[in-house]
Amino acid sequence: MMSEARFPDLKRFRTPSWFKGKVYYQAIGCQNGYETTGWHVGVHLKDILQNMDSPYDKAKGDWQNLDFTDDIDMLLWGNKYIRYVIKHIPMIKQFRFIKGLRQAHEEGRVEL
């Protein structure tokens, strides 16, 4: 039987249920990577931001001023505005998550 401690406690945070499912399946080693999760977060970014503590207009303005070629800049934005999402991505995998978020942006799928 698998230990409950291995999986992040997502019940207390303002994260969408589909995100909770993706993090759970990645924690047990399923195929879809964190790039896919980042892409989906990008597609649903407006809804996610509207459920966070951060002011939506400030997050939107900072998103529009982001340097999308700089992983660190994007990760800092994520830690500031979608911290309840980012905190559940293992640190070593966060740049893969950012890669997916950037891909959604480049495809024009992020609407704020």
Image (spheres, rainbow, N blue to C red):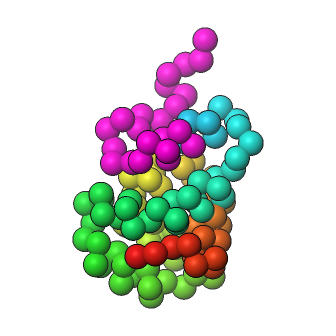
Residue 18 appearing in the image? yes
Query: Where, by quadrant of the figure, is residue 104 drawn?
Result: bottom right
In the image: residue 100, left or right of residue 6: right
Residue 17: in magenta span:
yes
In the image, residue 36 above or below residue 58: above
Q: 63 or 45: nearer the eye? A: 45
Picture coordinates of residue 102 (x, y %)?
61, 72
The N terminus sits in image quarter: top right
Residue 18: in magenta span:
yes
Query: Where, by quadrant of the figure, is residue 39 drawn?
Result: bottom right
Residue 94 appearing in the image? no
Q: Residue furthest bottom?
A: 65
In the image, residue 57 above or below residue 79: below
Picture coordinates of residue 4 (x, y %)?
50, 22
The magenta stretch spans which residues? 1-22
Q: Residue furthest top?
A: 1
